C-alpha cells in the first residue's frame, strides 16, 4: 500500500497496490472505532445477543437469548381439547430449537449437504475413529471387523456410474489409448534403499509383444490428497493412531479414492492377523520403545535428507504427483504403476506391443459455413403426401429417416409401445398378451396382411347389415347396441377376461356369443346353447352375456401385459352370512299368538364375544381359542354381478314386480297387514279349507319338527304366489284395500340376497313356483340352475298351446279349488312347470301387460291340472322322477349349492309325506304338538 | 332361642306424590335413578342432561354438550361418571363433578336410544336405531367400539346389562340376550316391537314391553312365558317398564297418562296411578325403596309409598 504521506516525488516512482483510502474531508475527525465493550451482537430478529460469562446467565440468559417471552417458553397455539382431541402433533427435536440452531452454524444445520451416497469419503471421521478405538479396546478386539465384513460394501454413485461405463478399478478415466505411455526407467541416480526391486526386464519383454490393435485404459491418476491440515502438529506428524499404536502396524492409508469400505476391512483383518504375532504395546515416534517391547530397531524414524529431492527437475511423467513430495505415502508407487499399466492377461498368440503405433492422424474440423448458426432446428416433416416424389426421395435420403410408413404423429398420439420403439427400449416382460409374440417376424407380417384384408371385407359386410337391422327393429332392444358396440366388444381370444371361467361351458358359449356379435350376427346360434336350457334361461343368459360384453371391452393388450392373472381366485361369488339365522317369523308369530313361548319363539346361537369385552366384563372368554367375533359366518353364493347392473330392462322388471305385488295384495283382501296367516280373521279360520290355511298348517308342522331353518324369501314368495288363483275372482272388487306401504315381499325381493335363500323344509308342495318365480330378486345363474327343474321343450310347447286358449276363470273356481281335497302340494309338477314357464318370462318381457295377462292363464292351467289330477297319478310319478333327475344334474353343475339342493330334496320328500295327510289330520297333530315337544 | 322372623311387611306401592321437578329442559325423554337411588338424571329434549336430588327436589348440575335431544342416561356404579346418548348419534361420557365431557363416542349411524354402563363402568353399551348395540371401551382411548352387536334387524329400543349378560330389545320384535359367559345369543320372539326390557332383580326373568300394549315376563333360561300384563296402552311410543324394588310388582308407563302396577305373580292390575294428562314417557324405580320417578311432558314426579315420611329421607347432597 502506498503510504499517503509519501512525498510527491516519490509518488511518481512508487507503484500503488490496493485501493486507496478515501481522502479525509477537512475538519472531520476520524471516526473512532466502536470500543469493544460497546460492540453488540444482534441476531437476525434484531434482538441483542448476550454473551454470558461464568456468573451471568441463569434465567435471564435463557430469556434474552432464546425464549421470546418473559414467561419463558411461549406455548404453542392453544387448541381446544374439545374440538381437537385426537390430533396430537408429534413433536420432534426441531420443535424445541430456534432458527439459529438450524442455521449453518447451529447444532442442527439444515443446509444442503452431500449425502453418503455421493460423498467420496466417509463423512464423520470422529465416528469412524471412535469405532476403531472401540474395536480395539473391546473385550474381543476387532469385533467390529465382523460388522465391516457383514456390512454391505458401499460404493459411491460416482464409482457406480463409472463402472457402468465400463471402468474397472485400477484403471484411469478417459478414452482408451492405443499404447500405454512408455514407462520411465528408474533414474540411476536415485538410490534405492531396502531390498532391490525385482528386475524389470520381464515387463519390458512383455511390452515387446504388445499387439497393435489393443487399446488400453489410461493410467490411473493418483489423486492428490488435499486434506487440509486441521491440527497444530508439525508437518507430517501423525498422532498416535490407535491401530498403529496397539498393533504396531502402520495403517497405511490407501491412496485410491475409490476404496473405502472394502479395503478397510481387509486392512483391519490384516491388523488382526498381525497382532497375533505381536504383543500389544504402544509404539510410535514419540514414545520410544515400550517396556514390553523387544525390538528396538525402529526407535527413531530416520528421515534422512536423501529421501527428499534436492534438485528441481521436470516432473517424472510416470508419477502423477506433479511435484508433490509427500514423504512415505507414495513410496511404492512403482509397484502400483505396474499394476495399473495393464490389467488382464494377454490372449494366446498376442503380445503387448513394444512400440507405440503411429500417432493418430488428426483431421482438422471442417470449416464452418459462413451462415452457420450454432442452433439446431428441426427439418420440415416429410410425408408421403408430398407431391414431388423426387423431392421426397431427396429429403428422405438427407434425413435418413423414413417417415412415410409412420406419418409423423404428435407424441401424444403415440401409444406406449410406439414410444418404446422410438426410444429403443425393450418390451415389458409381462405375460405375453397374445400368441403373436411367439411368431417370427415374417409370420407376423403375413398375419397382419390377412387381418387387414379380413377387416376390409368385414367393414363392407357390416354396413349394409346394420342398416338392415335398424330397419327391421322387431328384434330386441340391445341389438342396436350390439351393432353400435361393433368391434370394441371384448374379444374373447385376445383378452384374458373370462367372466364365466368357473363354468367352462358357459364361458365357451360366452365366447361364441361375443364372436357372433363381432361378426354382426344378431343372435347366438341355438345349436351352441345348452339343449337342456329353457327358453327363458337362454334369454337370460344372452342378456347376461351382452352385459358382460358391454362391461369388458377389449382391454388394451399393453395394459393387460402389465397385469398378471391372479394365482388364487378369490371367491367373488361368495358372501359371508351368519351360519345360522333367526328362523322365520311367521311360525314364531303363530306361536306368540298361541302364547306358546319357549322353544318355538327362541333361537339360540353360538355367539363369540370379543376378548376385550370379556375382559372388561370380568368373564372368561368362552371361546378362547377361536378368532371369530359375533355370530359364526359361512360363505354363501352371491348373485351374479350382472344382474345388479342398471339397465332399462331391470327397471321395468321392478315395475312389473311392484305391480305384481299390488295385484297380489289386492287379490286377497282378507289378508292382514302383517304377513302372517295366523292373523286371518276368525271367519276365515273356521273355514279351514282355504289354501293358505292348509299350507300354513303344513308348514308349521314341518317347522315344528325343526328340520331346516326356513327361507324367508321363498316363504314370502310362496305366499304371494298362492293367492294367484283367486285373482280373477277378487280383482274387480277391492281396489280400495290396497295398502299404502308395499309389502315386505317387495323389499325382500329388492334387497334380499341369495344368502337368505336356504332351501326350506317347510316349503309346502315343493312349490315349483316358488323356485322358479323369476322375481326381481337377482338370480344368479349359479343358484338358478339349482332351483330350476328340468323342463323339456315339449312342455314348453304344450304350455304355449294352452295359453292360446281364451282365458276366463269362472267365479266358481275358487270354491272348487277350496273344496278340492288335495291342493298345491299334490299337484303334478308338470303343470307347475308349465305355469312357471309362462310365469317366468314376465320380468324379461318387461311389459306390464304381459305379466298381467299371464295370471289368468295360469289359473286356468292350475285349474285344469287339478281336474285332471286324479287321472294322472302315473304322470305325476314320472315327473317326480324327472325332477329329481334335474336336481341331480344341477348338483353336478353347481357344487356350491349342493348342500342346499340336498336339503331341499330331503325336505321335498318330507313334504310329500306330509301332504299325503289330510288337513284334518294335520290340524290334529298340530294341536298336540306343544305337548309333544315339551 | 330364636325369635320367629317378623312377618314381612306387605310391599307397598308408591302412591304419594312427594316431589315435582319442573325440569325446564323441554320434554323429559327419560328419567333415571342413579345406582343408590339418591339422585336422578333427567334427559331433556333441549340437549341438556340434568342431575337432581329428587328427595329434596333440587337441581344439582346441568350437563350440556349434546348436539340434539338426550334420549337416555345412566350413572356409573361409583357415581363418578355418567353416560348419556342422544339423537345426535353420540354417546357421551361425563364427569359428574366437573360436568365436563370426558369422551364422546361416535359411530352409531342413527339416534342412540339407550345406554348402559356395565357393572364396573369399564364399558358403555349403547343401542341405536341403526339396529346395532355397540360396546364402547372406557378404559382405553380407542375411538371405535370393542364389539358391535348387529344381530338386530331393526332399531334397538332398550338395553340392560347384568354382570355377564347384555339384554336388548329391538323393534324387530325380539329380545336378545347375549350371554358372555356361555358365549351364546338367545333370541326370543315377542311378536311386536319391543319398547323396553329389563331383568328381574333375581336375574331369572326378563320383562319385555311391546307395542301391542302387553308386558311379558319371560323365563330367562327357557324363554317361556311366565306372565302377561295388559291393561295399559302402549301402541306408539317407546315407553319404559320396570319391576318394583322387590320384584313384587311390574310397572309400566302408559299413553293414557297413568302408570300401571301389576302383581307379578298373579298378573292382576293392582294400581293405576294417575300421573298426568299426557303420555308418561319414562319411569324409574328406586333400587331399594318403594319410590318411583315418572316423567310426563316437561315434568318429573317422585312418588313414595303412603307410609313414607320426610324424616326417612336419606342424607343427600
Image: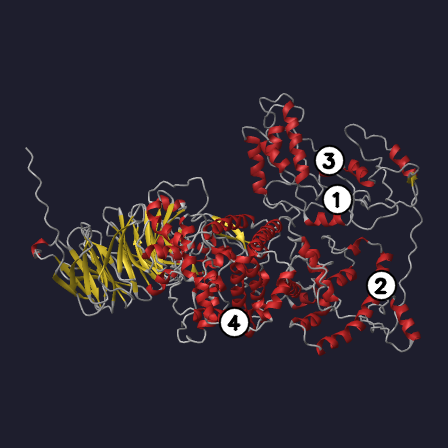
Residue contact between numbered discs 2 and 4, judged by CB atoms under 8 Å: no
How far apart are the two marked residues, 2 and 4, measured between alpha carbons? 50 Å
Say which label, 1 or 3, has the lower sequence index.
Answer: 1
Which numbered disc, 2 or 1, marks the residue closer to the eye?
2
- On the image, the x and y values in percent for residue B308 come to 9, 56
- Considering the numbered disc 3 on the image, is that residue within a helix, a strand or a loop? helix
Residue contact between numbered discs 2 and 3, judged by CB atoms under 8 Å: no
Counting labels gives 4
> For the residue carrying disc 3, how many other residues have a C-alpha within 10 Å: few (<14), some (14-19), or many (20+)?
few
Which numbered disc, 4 or 1, marks the residue closer to the eye?
4
> For the residue carrying disc 2, how many other residues have a C-alpha within 10 Å: few (<14), some (14-19), or many (20+)?
few
Q: Nearer the viewer, residue A932 or A520?
A: A932
How far apart are the two marked residues, 4 and 3, measured between alpha carbons? 112 Å
- Considering the numbered disc 1 on the image, is that residue within a helix, a strand or a loop? loop
- On the image, the x and y values in percent for residue A502 come to 64, 52
Same chain check for tags 4 and 1: yes
Residue where numbered disc 1 is placed: A222
**Looking at the image, which residue sits at the far front?**
A871
The numbered mark 2 sits on a residue in which chain?
A
Say which label, 2 or 4, has the lower sequence index.
Answer: 2
Which numbered disc, 2 or 4, marks the residue closer to the eye?
4
The quarter in which the C terminus of chain A is drawn is top left
How far apart are the two marked residues, 2 and 3, measured between alpha carbons? 90 Å
Horizontal side of A340 relative to A117 (left or right) equals right
Residue where numbered disc 2 is placed: A450
Residue where numbered disc 3 is placed: A305
Residue where numbered disc 4 is placed: A655
- On the image, the x and y values in percent for residue B138 come to 34, 51
The numbered mark 1 sits on a residue in which chain?
A
Same chain check for tags 1 and 3: yes
Say which label, 4 or 1, has the lower sequence index.
Answer: 1
Residue A334 numbered mark, or none: none
Amino acid at each position: 500500500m502506498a503510504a499517503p504521506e509519501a512525498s510527491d516525488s516519490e509518488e511518481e516512482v512508487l507503484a500503488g497496490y490496493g485501493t486507496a483510502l478515501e481522502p479525509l474531508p477537512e475538519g472531520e475527525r476520524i471516526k473512532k472505532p466502536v470500543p469493544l465493550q460497546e460492540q453488540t451482537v444482534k441476531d437476525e430478529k434484531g434482538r441483542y445477543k448476550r454473551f454470558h460469562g461464568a456468573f451471568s446467565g441463569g434465567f435471564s440468559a435463557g430469556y434474552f437469548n432464546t425464549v421470546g417471552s418473559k414467561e419463558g417458553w411461549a406455548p404453542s397455539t392453544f387448541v381446544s381439547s374439545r374440538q381437537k382431541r385426537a390430533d396430537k402433533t408429534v413433536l420432534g427435536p426441531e420443535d424445541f430449537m430456534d432458527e439459529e440452531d438450524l442455521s449453518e452454524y447451529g447444532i442442527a444445520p439444515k443446509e444442503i449437504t452431500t449425502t453418503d451416497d455421493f460423498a467420496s469419503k466417509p463423512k464423520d471421521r470422529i465416528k469412524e475413529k471412535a469405532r476403531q478405538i472401540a474395536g480395539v479396546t473391546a473385550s474381543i478386539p476387532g469385533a467390529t471387523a465382523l460388522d465391516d465384513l457383514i456390512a454391505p460394501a458401499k460404493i459411491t454413485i460416482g464409482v457406480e456410474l463409472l463402472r457402468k461405463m465400463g471402468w474397472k478399478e485400477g484403471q484411469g478415466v478417459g478414452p482408451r489409448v492405443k499404447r500405454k505411455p512408455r514407462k520411465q526407467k528408474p533414474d540411476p541416480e536415485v538410490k534405492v534403499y531396502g531390498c532391490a526391486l525385482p528386475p524389470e526386464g520381464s515387463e519390458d519383454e512383455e511390452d515387446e509383444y504388445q499387439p497393435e490393435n489393443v487399446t488400453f485404459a489410461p493410467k490411473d491418476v493418483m489423486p492428490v490428497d488435499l486434506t487440509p491440515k486441521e491440527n497444530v502438529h508439525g508437518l507430517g506428524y501423525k498422532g498416535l493412531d490407535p491401530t498403529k499404536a496397539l498393533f504396531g502396524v502402520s495403517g497405511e492409508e490407501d491412496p485410491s479414492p475409490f476404496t473405502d469400505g472394502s479395503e478397510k476391512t481387509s486392512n483391519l483383518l490384516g491388523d488382526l492377523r498381525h497382532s497375533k504375532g505381536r504383543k500389544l504395546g504402544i509404539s510410535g515416534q514419540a514414545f520410544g520403545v515400550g517396556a514390553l517391547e523387544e525390538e528396538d530397531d525402529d526407535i527413531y524414524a530416520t528421515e534422512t535428507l536423501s529421501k527428499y529431492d534436492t534438485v528441481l527437475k521436470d516432473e517424472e511423467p510416470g508419477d502423477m504427483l506433479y511435484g508433490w513430495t509427500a514423504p512415505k505415502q507414495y513410496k511404492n508407487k512403482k509397484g502400483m504403476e505396474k499394476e495399473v499399466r495393464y490389467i488382464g492377461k494377454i490372449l494366446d498368440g498376442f503380445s503387448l506391443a513394444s512400440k507405440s503405433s503411429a500417432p493418430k492422424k488428426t483431421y482438422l474440423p471442417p470449416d464452418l459455413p459462413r451462415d452457420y448458426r450454432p442452433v439446431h432446428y428441426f427439418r420440415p416433416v416429410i410425408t408421403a403426401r408430398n407431391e414431388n416424389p423426387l423431392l421426397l426421395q431427396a429429403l428422405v435420403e438427407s434425413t435418413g429417416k423414413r417417415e412415410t410408413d409412420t406419418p409423423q404423429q404428435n407424441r401424444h398420439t403415440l401409444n406406449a409401445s410406439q414410444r418404446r420403439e422410438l426410444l429403443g427400449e425393450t418390451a415389458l416382460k409381462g405375460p405375453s398378451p397374445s400368441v403373436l409374440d411367439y411368431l417370427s417376424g415374417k409370420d407376423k407380417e403375413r398375419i397382419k396382411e390377412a387381418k387387414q384384408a379380413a377387416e376390409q371385407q368385414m367393414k363392407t359386410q357390416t354396413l349394409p347389415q346394420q342398416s338392415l337391422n335398424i330397419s327391421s327393429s322387431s328384434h330386441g332392444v340391445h341389438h342396436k347396441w350390439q351393432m353400435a358396440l361393433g368391434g370394441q366388444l371384448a374379444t374373447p381370444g385376445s383378452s384374458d377376461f373370462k367372466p364365466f371361467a368357473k363354468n367352462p361351458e358357459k364361458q365357451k358359449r360366452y365366447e361364441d356369443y361375443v364372436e357372433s356379435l363381432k361378426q354382426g350376427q344378431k343372435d347366438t346360434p341355438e345349436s351352441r346353447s345348452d339343449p337342456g336350457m329353457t327358453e327363458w334361461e337362454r334369454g337370460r343368459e344372452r342378456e347376461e352375456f351382452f352385459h358382460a360384453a358391454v362391461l369388458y371391452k377389449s382391454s388394451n393388450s399393453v395394459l393387460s401385459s402389465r397385469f398378471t392373472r391372479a394365482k388364487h381366485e378369490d371367491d367373488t361369488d361368495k358372501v359371508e352370512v351368519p351360519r345360522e339365522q333367526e328362523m322365520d317369523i311367521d311360525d314364531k308369530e303363530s306361536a306368540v299368538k298361541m302364547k306358546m313361548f319357549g322353544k318355538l319363539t327362541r333361537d339360540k346361537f353360538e355367539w363369540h364375544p370379543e376378548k376385550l369385552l370379556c375382559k372388561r366384563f370380568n368373564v372368561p372368554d368362552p371361546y378362547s381359542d377361536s378368532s371369530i367375533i359375533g355370530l359364526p359366518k359361512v360363505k354363501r353364493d352371491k348373485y351374479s354381478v350382472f344382474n345388479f347392473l342398471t339397465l332399462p330392462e331391470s327397471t321395468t322388471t321392478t315395475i312389473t314386480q311392484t305391480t305384481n305385488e299390488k295385484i297380489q295384495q289386492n287379490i286377497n283382501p282378507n289378508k292382514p297387514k302383517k304377513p302372517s296367516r295366523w292373523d286371518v280373521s276368525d271367519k276365515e279360520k273356521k273355514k279351514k279349507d282355504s289354501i293358505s290355511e292348509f299350507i300354513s298348517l303344513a308348514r308349521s308342522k314341518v317347522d315344528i319338527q325343526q328340520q331346516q331353518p326356513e327361507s324367508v324369501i321363498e316363504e314370502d314368495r310362496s305366499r304371494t304366489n298362492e293367492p294367484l288363483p283367486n285373482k280373477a275372482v277378487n280383482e274387480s272388487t277391492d281396489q280400495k284395500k290396497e295398502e299404502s306401504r308395499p309389502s315386505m315381499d317387495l323389499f325382500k325381493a329388492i334387497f334380499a340376497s341369495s344368502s337368505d335363500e336356504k332351501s326350506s323344509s317347510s316349503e309346502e308342495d315343493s312349490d315349483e313356483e316358488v323356485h322358479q318365480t323369476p322375481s326381481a330378486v337377482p338370480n344368479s345363474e349359479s343358484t338358478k340352475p339349482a332351483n330350476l327343474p328340468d323342463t323339456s321343450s315339449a312342455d314348453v310347447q304344450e304350455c304355449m298351446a294352452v295359453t292360446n286358449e281364451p282365458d276366463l276363470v269362472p267365479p266358481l273356481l275358487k270354491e272348487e279349488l277350496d273344496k278340492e281335497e288335495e291342493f298345491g302340494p299334490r299337484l303334478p309338477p308338470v303343470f307347475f312347470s308349465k305355469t312357471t314357464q309362462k310365469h317366468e318370462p314376465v320380468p324379461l318381457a318387461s311389459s306390464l301387460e304381459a305379466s298381467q295377462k299371464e295370471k289368468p292363464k295360469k289359473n286356468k292351467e292350475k285349474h285344469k291340472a287339478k281336474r285332471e289330477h286324479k287321472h294322472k297319478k302315473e304322470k305325476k310319478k314320472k315327473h317326480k322322477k324327472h325332477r329329481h333327475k334335474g336336481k341331480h344334474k344341477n348338483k353336478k353343475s353347481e357344487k356350491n349349492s349342493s348342500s342346499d339342493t340336498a336339503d331341499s330334496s330331503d325336505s321335498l320328500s318330507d313334504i310329500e309325506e306330509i301332504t299325503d295327510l289330510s288337513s284334518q289330520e294335520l290340524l290334529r297333530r298340530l294341536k298336540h304338538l306343544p305337548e309333544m315337544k315339551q | 332361642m330364636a325369635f320367629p322372623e317378623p312377618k314381612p311387611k306387605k310391599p307397598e306401592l308408591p302412591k304419594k306424590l312427594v316431589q315435582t321437578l319442573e325440569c325446564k329442559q323441554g320434554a323429559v325423554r327419560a328419567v333415571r335413578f342413579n345406582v343408590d337411588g339418591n339422585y336422578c338424571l333427567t334427559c331433556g329434549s333441549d340437549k341438556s342432561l340434568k342431575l337432581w336430588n329428587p328427595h329434596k327436589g333440587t337441581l344439582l348440575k346441568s350437563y350440556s354438550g349434546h348436539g340434539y335431544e338426550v334420549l337416555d342416561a345412566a350413572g356409573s356404579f361409583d357415581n363418578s361418571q355418567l353416560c348419556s346418548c342422544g339423537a345426535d348419534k353420540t354417546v357421551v361420557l361425563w364427569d359428574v363433578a366437573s360436568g365436563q365431557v370426558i369422551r364422546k363416542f361416535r359411530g352409531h349411524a342413527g339416534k342412540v336410544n339407550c345406554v348402559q354402563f356395565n357393572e364396573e363402568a369399564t364399558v358403555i353399551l349403547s343401542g341405536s336405531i341403526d339396529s346395532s348395540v355397540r360396546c364402547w371401551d372406557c378404559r382405553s382411548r380407542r375411538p371405535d367400539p370393542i364389539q358391535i352387536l348387529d344381530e338386530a334387524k331393526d332399531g334397538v329400543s332398550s338395553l340392560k346389562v347384568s354382570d355377564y349378560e347384555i339384554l336388548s330389545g329391538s323393534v324387530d320384535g325380539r329380545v336378545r340376550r347375549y350371554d358372555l359367559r356361555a358365549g351364546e345369543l338367545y333370541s326370543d320372539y315377542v311378536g311386536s316391537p319391543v319398547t323396553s326390557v329389563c331383568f328381574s332383580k333375581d336375574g331369572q326373568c326378563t320383562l319385555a314391553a311391546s307395542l301391542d300394549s302387553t308386558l311379558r315376563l319371560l323365563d330367562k333360561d327357557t324363554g317361556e312365558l311366565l306372565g302377561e300384563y295388559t291393561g295399559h296402552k302402549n301402541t306408539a311410543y317407546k315407553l319404559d317398564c320396570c319391576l318394583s324394588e322387590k320384584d313384587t310388582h311390574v310397572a309400566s308407563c302408559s299413553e293414557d297418562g297413568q302408570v300401571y302396577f301389576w302383581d307379578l305373580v298373579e298378573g292382576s292390575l293392582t294400581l293405576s296411578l294417575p300421573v298426568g294428562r299426557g303420555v308418561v314417557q319414562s319411569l324409574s324405580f328406586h333400587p331399594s325403596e318403594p319410590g318411583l320417578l315418572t316423567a310426563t311432558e316437561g315434568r318429573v314426579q317422585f312418588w313414595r309409598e303412603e307410609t313414607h315420611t320426610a324424616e326417612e329421607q336419606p342424607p343427600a347432597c
